[in-house]
Image (cartoon, helix red, strand yellow):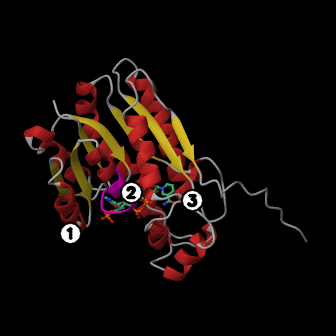
Amino acid sequence: MPNVVFITGATSGFGRACAIRFAAAGWSLILTGRRAERLDELKEQLGGQVPVHVAPLDVRDHAAVRALVEGLPAEFRAVKVLINNAGLALAPGRAQEVDLNDWHTMIDTNVTGLVNVTHALLPSLIENGAGASIVNLGSVAGQWPYQGSHVYGATKAFVRQFSYNLRCDLLGTGVRVTDVAPGLAESEFTLVRTGWNQEAYDKLYRDTTPLQPEDIAEQVFHVATLPPHININRLEIMPVRQAWAGFAIDRD
Ligand code: NDP
Ligand code: 8X3
């Protein structure tokens, strides 16, 4: 049986890097995301190497998620690894300044979308049993508070707790679950968060050494291909040049 990985948000950043990493190891790829042209480019790039199935998908649409999973071609049906990577941050200002729609979009994508895909693929993962994995992209923002994180960080705290809770329910099935929680990493994530503000992007990554999508893909591949008796529950990854700030104090 071929090893099949299902990746959400494969059109950019970590998801795209994961596609390349798993292809290098000979895995069959199911690549999803909303930007169809980018999926086609990736299929063009990797299709000569491994079997690739691309499918435009908005993870917020649970009926579309269900239809996609139920309609997978036979050779892609036995999904062994799910990488729940699709996600975004919006509205980097303070909570009291942001648009409620941005909060809804983050919850709909990072929480509802992630559970939509997980629910649809659990039967396949359980059927695979020992060695199957769910890798959820959380964030340092799911653990550590900071200004402007508000709902984004809260969605990632959901990802962490959902990952732990899934582990409890999946005990005995052989399916493992990991919350991979990166810190500062260079990707379109920051352009999305700032409304495609190139200046803000350049400022954030200037004169430091952020993580790269390939760094995260290597860690995702690692946790998903460990011997089947090992489960990494949570993997928090920061660049060496990032650490925590102190408590903030309001003064007269
Ligand atoms: P990118 O913006 O580069 O990639 C995000 C991906 O998510 C894109 O492929 C995008 O595809 C997809 N996506 C967004 N919304 C939807 C949707 N509704 N349906 C389907 N796909 C969607 O960001 P990263 O690669 O950096 O981020 C990947 C994950 O890692 C996210 O969950 C993010 O929160 C998390 N993360 C990022 C960090 C960082 O600093 N970069 C640090 C910690 C965690 P498309 O637009 O084509 O649909
Ligand atoms: C993204 C990392 O530090 O911008 O999840 O919140 S951070």
Which x, y percent locates residue 46? 21, 55
Task: State the SS at label 2.
Answer: helix
Residue of label 2: 109
Q: Say if the magenta span includes residue 160.
A: no
The kind of residue tagged 2 is: Thr
Outermost residue, right direction? 252
Residue of label 1: 37
Mark 2 residue CB less than 8 A from any atom of ligand 1: yes
The kind of residue tagged 3 is: Leu
Bounds of the magenta segment: 9-18
- In the figure, 215 relative to 193: above or below? above
Which tag is nearer the camera, tag 2 or tag 1? Answer: 1
- Split into quadrants, the picture shows ligand 2 in the one at bottom right
Mark 3 residue CB less than 8 A from any atom of ligand 2: yes
- Where residue 126 is drawn, which disc sits there? none
C-alpha separation, residue under disc 2 versus residue under disc 1: 21 Å
The kind of residue tagged 1 is: Glu
